[in-house]
Amino acid sequence: MDEDLITNPKWSQRRQNRATAFRFIFQWEMNPSEDLNRDLMDFINRLGKDEGFYNYAIELVDGIVEKKDIIDSMIKELVDNWEFSRIAKADLSLLRVAIYEIQYRLDIPPVVVIDETLEISKEFSTENSKKFLNGVLDKFISNIQRPSRKPAI
């Protein structure tokens, strides 16, 4: 078990999974992998939880990597007046996780995703980042055709 990788043990399993996906996506952005699946499994195995605990994180990472170009184009549209390359890498990784969940996980209400993203950002980002993330994600959910406070399916 790698103590530096462990997320807040008081967090729910789902939030720990989101944070794990965020941290892996952040690492992957900084140092792209030759073998994403192997590196993801190595990362998760170092966390020391039972097999299966991080299934949702694996699902998130797989979906984000598969849809990265689509997600990034959505982010670019949302951050008009801001150069995409200037977005802090941690914030970009948090946005990728959140936008993937809002767009593709219709069983999760968008406001839940935003709340979770802001809670995770408290651990890994700055107060200014929290405002930025909240603004971008609020704009995103105002442009989608689904209820913001309940699942779409």
Image (cartoon, grey):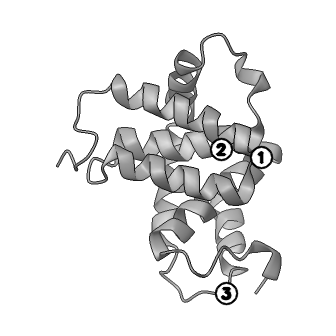
Q: For residue 100, say whether it is visible.
A: yes
Disc ID at residue 93 = 2
Contact, mark 2 vs mark 3 (Cβ under 8 Å): no
C-alpha separation, residue under disc 1 versus residue under disc 3: 24 Å
SS class, disc 2: helix
| Residue at image location 73% in from the left, 16% down from the top | 83
SS class, disc 3: loop
C-alpha separation, residue under disc 1 versus residue under disc 2: 13 Å
Query: Which one is earlier in the sequence, the residue at label 1 or at label 3?
Result: 1
The residue identified by callout 1 is 32
| Residue at image location 71% in from the left, 77% down from the top | 6
Q: Amino acid at mark 1?
A: Pro
In the image, taking residue 126 as reference, residue 54 lies left or right, namely left
In percent of width and height, residue 137 lies at 48, 34
On screen, residue 45 above or below 148: below
Q: Amino acid at mark 3?
A: Gly
In the image, taking residue 95 as reference, residue 31 lies left or right, namely right
Q: Amino acid at mark 2?
A: Ser
SS class, disc 1: loop
Q: For residue 34, say whether it is visible.
A: no
